[in-house]
Amino acid sequence: KAGVTQTPRYLIKTRGQQVTLSCSPISGHRSVSWYQQTPGQGLQFLFEYFSETQRNKGNFPGRFSGRQFSNSRSEMNVSTLELGDSALYLCASREAGGRETQYFGPGTRLLVL
Amino acid sequence: SQKIEQNSEALNIQEGKTATLTCNYTNYSPAYLQWYRQDPGRGPVFLLLIRENEKEKRKERLKVTFDTTLKQSLFHITASQPADSATYLCARDTGTASKLTFGTGTRLQVTL
């Protein structure tokens, strides 16, 4: 099976802009989670989508949002970008039914200038 | 909040030795702990999961222990190789399978 894919891999934006990142989970996986990774804070959970519904949410402002489509692909959006949003954004997919192992994609490196 | 700490930011060892990485958690005991490997510029790769009722788990040269009394997990790589050089992350569940809390990672460097 193909792994988790994320597009784009790299992105440069300026403050105030918005950005949309995409994630395609492993075939058959219905849960997609998003994480932000920065040198200072490490990996932090953003949110999880399952069957097109947000199931869990981390402690991030409302500027961070996401959605999931019927084919389980997911997008996350960050509006009104701030310098501090520069990070590696990772998505992870997981089988449903209580299987805990998450499979991460390669990430999207976002730089906000 | 459930915190998780990896004491060493970096660990340098010689090839062939055993690397031991530490992960400590606070508050209630997690149902399980997971260990991941992350190479620069790439996403974490799952290595091992150990449940609270398990003392030890092994996979090839990897061994993980879980001590609920000490609130600690140890991750061992035996007969380490330069290819083992990477950042290793531990993660705990938060009561929700997908919502993991990660430690900041330990960067392991194995030299010849």
Image (spheres, rainbow, N blue to C red):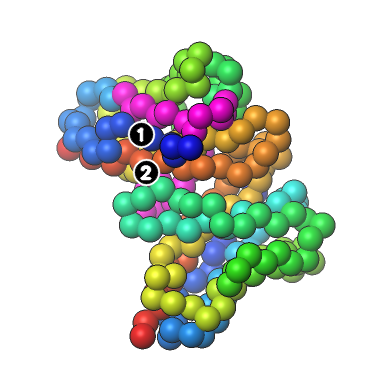
Residue A102 lies, with reference to residue B74, above or below; the image says above
Element type at mark 2:
loop
Q: Amino acid at mark 1?
A: Gln
> Can residue B49 be found in the magenta stretch?
no
The percent coordinates of residue B16 (x first, y second) are 48, 85
Snapshot quadrant of residue A79: top left
Q: Can you name the residue that lies furthest to the right here?
A: B53
The percent coordinates of residue B69 (x first, y second) are 79, 66
Q: Chain of mark 1?
A: A
Look at the magenta stretch and give its main secondary structure.
strand
Q: Is residue A103 left or right of residue A40?
A: right
The image quadrant where one finds the C terminus of chain B is bottom left
Q: Which residue is mark 2?
A: A106
Snapshot quadrant of residue A63: top left
The image quadrant where one finds the N terminus of chain B is top right
Residue visible at 23% across and 25% down in the picture: A16
Q: Which residue is mark 1?
A: A6
Residue A75 is at least partly visible in this image: yes
